[in-house]
């Protein structure tokens, strides 16, 4: 497809040239269905990137729930209505005890903003710990945690960034529980610094699958140790499920359940409304009631009946179409295929992830583990040209990120793998085009 320069120029004029776009040659998408996207020329793309349309693009069940409720009523949440309560009950019912109360909001950023406010109020402390390759949203307070965009450091005295747990490039060359302890020590040091500075530790906020970090294999016992240190200092564990949640890990509904450590606060977003702006926070009654007593928190669009009807339909589809199990089985199948490709291609240093959230770390040299970000970018663009949409992430932008809608089938997986194999085989001339 040739790039629509007229559309690009309008976009620059109206939204600014800095408004981000995917791919060297941006794609003009006009329709979506299931795991497929279609451009203005009718070219079909396999979507292996978008987790927001979690149950598939334009799922008829979700579209119908939205249509039906918006024909009847859509109004903010300061009137009594069953749907907000039905949805809050269903959502909290999917979480571990004691996470039994909810805020329903519109974006992941808002959800994390509430979590930070709640943690700081409840603990009376200010310091927040995040990783050195994190993104949690775009509000002023949450942006202080966006270390991915701030060169690995936090641009605020109230936030400290610690190295993310990584078994591929391990701290001090350690492994297993010793590695977990070494990373946990870094958290302990950050807590001690907060104590010395007088701000104290209000909590630690992490994505439970460390998605922006490149989906590292987390050494065993890491979360237990880290959360142990944070709670001993009076802080809270805030789990960001904006990317990891809603069955994507295949093994569990929530990423935090993989470690077995129940958070104090959980934030959710992206896949929650299948594209409709729906996000949320769950926490225990002490935290939520304490916050509600002190803050008149209100959100105009959060908790409206249309949003809740959509959220309910998304949960219905996840259950009825057995999507968590599909995620587990298909995700494993893809990782097996990727490991076979790894045997033939030196460039693939590591294959990892959970369910349908997959990371493929590319390295120029397997021994030295030299990151290969240019190759990653070239492969992402070459796969797009061949009709498969993926992306790249990680500390060095060298991890191929695959995160398709959950109804991804084995046939879809075969197509993904064969296109990747083809692109890897043509790697040299593709790189020459950069
Ligand atoms: N947390 C994580 C882990 C995210 O990936 C994102 C968005 N990329 C957010 C929070 C922010 O969500 P939103 O864009 O809906 O504000």
Image (tube, rainbow, N blue to C red):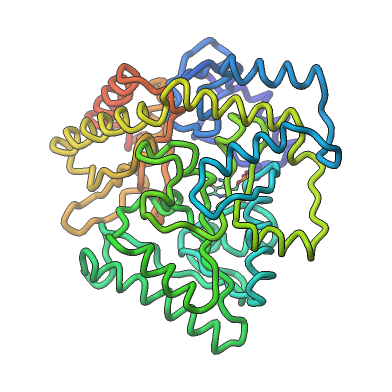
Q: Quadrant of residue 88?
A: top right
241 to the left or right of 73: left
- Name above or below for residue 82 compared with residue 121: above
Pinpoint residue 44: horizontal percent, then vertical percent. Answer: 47, 14
Q: Is residue 311 left or right of residue 206?
A: right
Q: Residue at x 72, y 31 (%)?
A: 83
Q: Quadrant of the C terminus?
A: top left
Q: Is residue 208 left or right of residue 399?
A: right
Asked if residue 434 shows in the view, the reply is: no
Observer-nearest of 173 and 276 = 276
Query: Where does the image place residue 230, in percent across and percent down from the top left?
Result: 48, 73
Of residues 44 and 269, which is closer to you in this image? 269
Q: Nearer the viewer, residue 310 or 206?
A: 310
- Vertical arrangement, residue 31 with respect to residue 283, above or below: above
Query: In the shown orientation, is residue 51 left or right of residue 421?
Result: right
- In the rendered picture of this protein, how many numbered marks are placed on residues? 0
Residue reaching furthest to the bottom? 196
Q: Quadrant of residue 290?
A: bottom right
């Amino acid at each position: 497809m040739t790039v629509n320069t007229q559309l690009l120029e309008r976009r620059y004029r109206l939204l600014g040239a800095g408004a981000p776009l995917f791919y060297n040659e941006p794609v003009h998408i006009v329709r979506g269905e299931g795991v497929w996207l279609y451009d203005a020329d009718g070219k079909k793309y396999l979507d292996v990137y978008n987790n927001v349309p979690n149950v598939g693009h334009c799922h008829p069940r979700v579209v119908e729930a939205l249509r039906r409720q918006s024909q009847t009523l859509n109004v903010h949440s300061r009137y009594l209505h069953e749907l907000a309560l039905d949805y809050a009950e269903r959502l909290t019912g999917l979480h571990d005890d004691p996470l039994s109360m909810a805020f329903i909001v519109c974006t992941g950023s808002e959800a994390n903003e509430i979590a930070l406010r709640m943690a700081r109020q409840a603990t009376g402390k200010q310091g927040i710990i995040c990783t050195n390759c994190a993104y949690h949203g775009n509000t002023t307070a949450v942006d202080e945690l966006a270390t991915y965009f701030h060169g690995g450091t936090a641009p605020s005295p109230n936030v400290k960034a610690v190295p993310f747990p990584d078994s591929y490039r391990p701290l001090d060359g350690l492994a297993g529980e010793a590695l977990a302890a070494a990373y946990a020590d870094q958290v302990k040091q950050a807590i001690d610094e907060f104590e010395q500075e007088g701000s104290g530790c209000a909590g630690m906020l992490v994505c439970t699958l460390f998605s922006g970090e490149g989906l590292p294999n987390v050494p065993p016992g890491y979360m237990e140790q880290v959360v142990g240190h944070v709670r001993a200092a009076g802080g809270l564990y805030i789990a960001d499920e904006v990317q990891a949640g809603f069955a994507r890990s295949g093994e569990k509904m929530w990423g935090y359940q993989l470690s077995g450590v129940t958070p104090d606060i959980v934030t959710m977003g992206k896949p929650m409304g299948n594209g409709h702006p729906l996000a949320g926070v769950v926490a225990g009654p002490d935290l939520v009631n304490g916050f509600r007593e002190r803050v008149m928190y209100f959100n105009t669009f959060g908790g409206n009946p249309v949003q809740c009807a959509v959220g309910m339909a998304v949960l219905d589809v996840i259950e009825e179409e057995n999507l968590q199990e599909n995620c587990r089985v298909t995700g494993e199948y893809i990782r097996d295929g990727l490991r076979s490709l790894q045997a033939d291609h030196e460039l693939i240093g590591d294959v990892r992830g959970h369910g349908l959230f997959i990371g493929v770390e590319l390295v120029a040299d397997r021994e030295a583990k030299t990151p290969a970000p240019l190759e990653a970018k070239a492969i992402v663009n070459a796969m797009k040209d061949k009709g498969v949409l993926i992306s790249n992430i990680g500390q060095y932008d060298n991890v191929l990120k695959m995160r398709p809608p959950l109804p991804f089938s084995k046939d879809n997986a075969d197509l993904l793998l064969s296109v990747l194999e083809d692109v890897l085989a043509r790697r040299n001339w593709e790189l020459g085009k950069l």
